[in-house]
Image: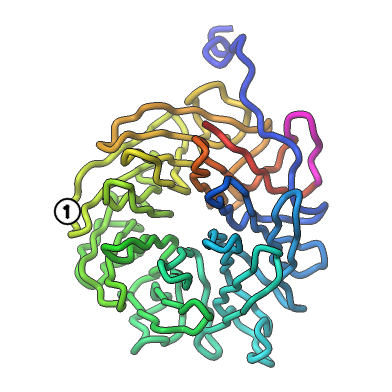
Amino acid sequence: MADLGPGLSVVPPAGLPAPLHGTSAVDWAGGVAAAADGTLTIGYATAENGDLDAVVTRPGGWTRRIATPADERLYGVVPLPDGGVLAAGYTKGDLDGKHAGNGTDDAFVVRLGPDGEVRWTTQFGAPDAADRVYGLAAAPDGGAYVAGYTKGALDGVNAGDKDAIAARLSPDGEVRWIRQYGGPGEDKATGVAAAATGVYLTGSTTAALPGTTARGGTDGWLAAYTADGARTWAATEGGSGDDRLNAVTVTTAGLIVATGATSGDALTVAYTDRGKRRWEHRLATAAADEGAAVAALPGGEIAVAGYTRGKVGVPAGGADVLTLRLDAKGAQRAAAQLGTARDDGVDPFAEPNLYAAATGQGKVAIAGLTYGTPDGGRALGNGDVFLATVP
């Protein structure tokens, strides 16, 4: 009883809402977009047909499959002013009809109209080398910024292994510029955010990136670019162990805020647009915690979504979805966890699989992977995608 007592509660854990999205095959979350009127659109990848197909769906509306006979995986969905969305990820096939015989990962961006119809598809990458997109942001003119990595040479010479990349696409899908950023180690960009002050990338590196100092193990990093693709500053985060930064946003107060993990704790950091570090917030339990997504709220506040294997509220079991609300100075205003009896928000490789977007209706939409059963519903099997809105 002494061992069990601290884990017992008369308050039930907060569950995930039904219905789940996906199929009876393996499914992976691929993004969530919130329009100004609160309309939500989610993306995911499914192995229903044997290979992975990308799917974008507006619950209660339309569903669009983005697929070839090879694999496609989504890593971002963002809203557009016309009611449509952008979606981005990678393909091993010929998604745009211009890459016959492709056998390696290529980056892609798709623009869908308000009716779910494809307006354009752009596919790009280095021949015979892997290229992936892990982050997506809408540009002010209706175009896009994407972030990811290449094992090839898209902008000069590859510095070694994987190099992080950023790319700018026009409103009609033309690739305006690509920037490659890497050192001798493995470098990946996993998040991107755009504002009037610039474009901001975040990711991970196993060695020193140009303009930074290695801290040991895997480091998280932030880098700033102008709208024309000129890098203006970069910084690393972490200690001697393995650390990473997964996502980034720009607050209404103009701070660049990124979230990830350091030493097993969920880490959120804020920088000015000139690269000065303003504050950090850590959430630490007795188990693993990690920030996976971050969204800007009114008044300079921030919502963070991630996962925890510890106790923040009432644990549901396995890894639970973690939600945080921070004020404009990084002070914690609220924290909670929700989930099922199995792992939520994280995949079998301990990689977070979660996305978040502020709805503008006083809530935050969170989409992610779950292996459990939702409240009042059923599991589809082999990992499904949940969609929840939280205050």
- Locate residue 206, reporting x and y percent: 35, 64
Who is closer to the viewer here, 143 or 94? Answer: 143
Who is closer to the viewer here, 14 or 301? Answer: 301
- Locate residue 29, reporting x and y percent: 63, 54
Instruction: Pick the quarter of the image with the N terminus.
Output: top right
Give the residue at mark 1. Answer: 276
The 10 Å Cα crowd at callout 1, few under 14, some 14 to 19, many 20 or more, is few
Tally of numbered tags:
1
- The residue at 72%/48% (across/down) is 384
- The residue at 58%/45% (across/down) is 38
Q: How is the image coloured?
A: rainbow
Asked if residue 103 lies in the magenta stretch, the reply is no
Who is closer to the viewer here, 318 or 332? Answer: 332
Q: Is residue 265 left or right of residue 358?
A: left
Q: Is residue 49 left or right of residue 8?
A: right
- The residue at 44%/28% (across/down) is 335
The relative height of residue 117 versus residue 273 in the rendered view (above or below) is below
**Main secondary structure found in the magenta portion:** loop
Residue 189 appears in view: yes
Please state the extent of the stretch shown in magenta in the rendering: 374-380
Residue 70 in which image quadrant: bottom right
Residue 204 appears in view: no
Q: Is residue 159 left or right of residue 173?
A: left
Q: Is residue 20 left or right of residue 253?
A: right
Asked if residue 375 lies in the magenta stretch, the reply is yes
The relative height of residue 35 versus residue 86 in the rendered view (above or below) is above
- Locate residue 137, reporting x and y percent: 45, 63
Residue 61 in which image quadrant: bottom right
